[in-house]
Image (cartoon, grey):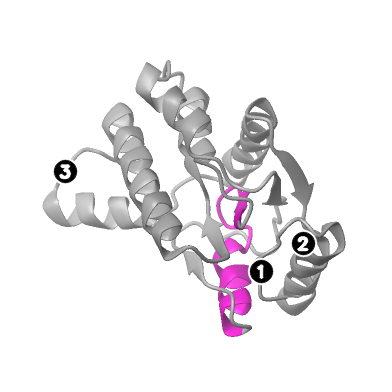
Amino acid sequence: MSSPDFYIITGGPGVGKTTLLGELQRRGYPYVREVAREIIREQMAEEGDALPWGNVREYTALMLARSIEDYRSALQAGEFRFFDRGIPDALGYARMNGLLPEPEWEEAGRLFRYGETVFLLPPWEEIYRPDAERKQDYAEAVDTYHCLKREYELWGYRPVEVPRLPVEQRADFVLGIISSREICSNNPL
């Protein structure tokens, strides 16, 4: 499966992804939420151990399964969509934590494809804030950024770094790249 009308916005933690996606949604562009925080909240509420600081393999498997569910749901909707992270994020997370990806995980990376251009938000120390679900320090956030960039390149995507600008200008940048490359025939631009 492949959808050139699906665009990933990714990066390390605390770089403004959710804020950017909120601005894009305000402008009428739908997006699929990040699964990682949802899983963390559920696991903490249930006192489960499928957490980034617990059973990392199970946490990764849950992230991947939910990302596939979200992809399939979006495909059925059949419309332009942004994703707050994608399947390669889960695969990169596995590698970053020293896990050997399961064969079915790698099959998911091959099978469920997004648009070639991936919007990568760089580390931004001035806005980075840890919280109850984001426990990494800033150095780990930087490492995550580099890991994700490599992972997306490994899977044949073209990461485009989104400049550190006010959110409205970041949204303009993303939409401008999509529009200028004419890589989305069904988008609402």
Distance from disc 3 to disc 2, alpha carbons, whole Å, reads 40 Å
Q: Is residue 8 magenta?
A: yes
Q: Provide residue 182's location: percent of width, then percent of height.
A: 81, 60
Give the extent of the magenta segment: 6-26
- Determine whether 146 is above or below 170 in the image: above
Query: Is residue 133 in view from this perspective?
Result: no
Question: Does residue 63 appear left or right of residue 174 in this picture?
Answer: left
Percent x, y of residue 172: 79, 73
Dot 1 falls on a residue whose secondary structure is: loop
Identify which residue is drawn at 71% across, 56% down.
124
Q: How many marks?
A: 3
Lower position in the chain sequence, tag 2 or tag 1: 2
Amino acid at circle 2? Ile
Asked where in the image residue 178 lies, by quadrant, the reply is: bottom right
Determine whether 98 is above or below 3 in the image. above
Q: Tell me which numbered mark, 3 or 1, is placed earlier along the sequence.
A: 3
Query: The residue tagged with tag 3: helix, strand or loop?
Result: loop
Q: Is residue 123 visible?
A: yes
Residue at image coords 46%, 23%: 106
Choose mark 2 or mark 1, whichever is in front: 1
Residue designated by label 3: 48
Q: Mark 1 points at which residue?
A: 187
Query: Which disc, if any, is residue 178?
Result: 2
Amino acid at pointer 1: Asn
